[in-house]
Image (cartoon, rainbow, N blue to C red):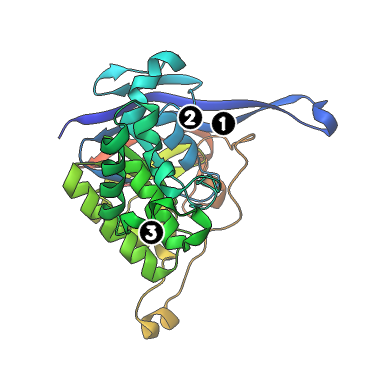
Amino acid sequence: MSALLSARGVSMHYRLKRGWFGRGEPVTVKALTEIDLDIEAGETLALVGESGSGKSTLGRVLIRTLSPSAGTIAFRGNDITALDRRRLRPLRRHFQIVFQDPFGSLNPRLSIGRAVAEPLVVHGLAKGAALRARVAEALSLVGLDPAWAGRRPHEFSGGQRQRICIARAVIGRPDFIVADEALSALDVTLQGQMLGLFADLKQRFGLTYLFISHDLDTVRQIADRVAVLYLGRIVELAPASALFEGARHPYTQALLAAMPVPDPVRERARIEAPLRGDPPSPANPPSGCAFHPRCPRATDKCRADLPALRTLAAGHQAACHYAD
């Protein structure tokens, strides 16, 4: 495999004003800091971490709906970091995003056929009979009747609306899809159906996914590799099997320890070691390793020195002084 998207030294920092009516001293919020990441063509890379860790921000930076404060983004080896809106426009057809809320992602005044057709219309890829045929094909691919193309979003269930959003994402044959908590609003049965649909579309079209989720059980089913984010930094990156069988970073280990066990007897007997406290503020991150205030293994070295993301085994990296 070769890298489809690459990030090097990517940071995303915001300057916000505090206090009533923004009259306080501005503060810098460090949403992402010095991210190095390659996403290989044809893989599903999962991005996990607690709320506020920077997952959604990274997804949007990679497809340039947000511009990074520092670093570079490359698509198929070509630097796209500094491209303006006009020069980015032809590349937009290669990137799509599926959001968590399917109803909020669809214009209630548009028929689903028009919503699904939008990427083809915007990029001038089809019109007339050819456009209608492509819409019918996309709806069929996601298990919806093409005869429903004239209906409005409110006439569909949550699972059906998410299928409509997926049809819209794949109709232009993109290279890369960001699925941003795309399954979290669905029940377990629908999640299973959507996972099967994502897998089928990946095989059919050779898609590459960035799958953003807080549900590690879902991640285990779909991901080829997993990147773990904590306070805007990657703290562990590994093949999915290696991470679930032998996580090296204490934060990843804590996340895995909190996963429910499907066996009710084992679940009742399980001793869960929850993470201590809340994540620090990205506006005031701790010195050294950002995880040290919550880490049971933290030492003075952790409080003073930022650990580098280093290779521990083939394809397995972790940012911890004591990972082995």
Q: Which of 280 and 17 is in front in this view?
A: 17
Of the numbered discs in the image, which one, if any, rests on residue 165? none
Q: How far apart are marks 1 and 3 (CA)?
A: 25 Å
How far from the left and from the top, in percent, is residue 162?
42, 55
3 displayed left or right of 252: left
Total label count?
A: 3
Which of pointers 1 and 3 lies earlier in the amino acid sequence? 1
Tell which residue pokes out farthest to the left in this image: 1
Answer yes or no: do the residues labelled 2 and 1 have beta carbons within 8 Å? yes
Q: Look at mark 3 in the image and give the residue it sits on.
A: 216
Q: Give the image location of residue 132, x and y in percent.
A: 31, 42
Q: How crowded is mark 3: few (under 14 residues within 10 Å), some or many (20 or more)?
A: many
Q: Is mark 1 on a helix, strand or loop?
A: strand
Q: Is residue 317 visible?
A: no
Please give the residue where the numbered disc 1 appears in the rendered image. Answer: 30
Mark closer to the observer (3, 2) = 3
Label ID, residue 33 = 2
Q: Identify the amino acid type marked 2.
A: Thr
Residue at 25% x, 30% y is 4
222 over 171 or under it: above or below: below
